Amino acid sequence: MINDVDVQKFIESWKDGLFKIRNIYDKGGDYKSEAILFIEKHYLFGEESVLFKPTMTRKVAFRNNLDDALSYFIGGGIEEDKGFALTKWKSIEIDEMHTAQIEEGTIVMGKLCFTSDEKLDVAFTFVLKSTNDILKIKAHHSSQIK
């Protein structure tokens, strides 16, 4: 059974991963490789199917494979993707979080507050599954709260 402490640690790791990609980008390093590691660490791509509806999408709503997820996080293959992980986030705070256990894992819903020059409030849902005692995202849906 996945407990709330494990979920909190996972969310913190996910947030830290976004900051790490941006820091490597700022230093002129291999941010693409870091983004791939981030996705492989936090999402089940390569192990099983994943459903991913990121926050900032308009024309192409879903990123259900590793290449499309990579495009979302650092820009690339999909024209509208500007690189969510490359945004200069000053902070990412969890404002609210709720969990529900399911047979194969945990559903997490909450609110993340991203701060850069502006504030972006996001409602998110992650379906987390434990694989080899590591939590990963099976489904991710997020949308801006206005």
Image: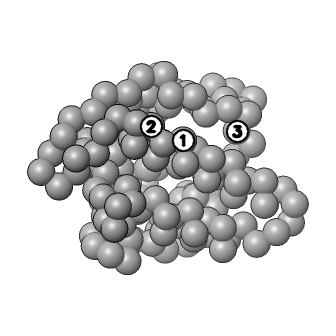
- Name the mark on residue 89: 3
Asked if the residue at tag 1 contacts the one at tag 2, i.e. Cβ–Cβ closer than 8 Å, the answer is yes
Q: Nearer the viewer, mark 3 or mark 2?
A: 2
Q: Is residue 125 above or below residue 48?
A: above
User: Who's the residue at 28% across and 73% down the image?
Assistant: 48
**Residue 71 in view (yes/no):** no
Task: Classify mark 1: helix, strand or loop.
Answer: helix
Asked if the residue at tag 2 contacts the one at tag 3, i.e. Cβ–Cβ closer than 8 Å, the answer is no
Mark 2 and mark 1: Cα distance apart in space: 6 Å
Which callout, 3 or 1, points at the residue further toward the start of the chain?
Answer: 1
Q: Quadrant of residue 62?
A: bottom left
x, y percent for residue 137: 36, 56
Give the camera-side residue of 83 and 78: 83
Q: Quadrant of residue 119?
A: top right
Residues packed near mark 2 inside 10 Å, few (<14), some (14 to 19) or many (20 plus):
some
- Name the mark on residue 12: 1
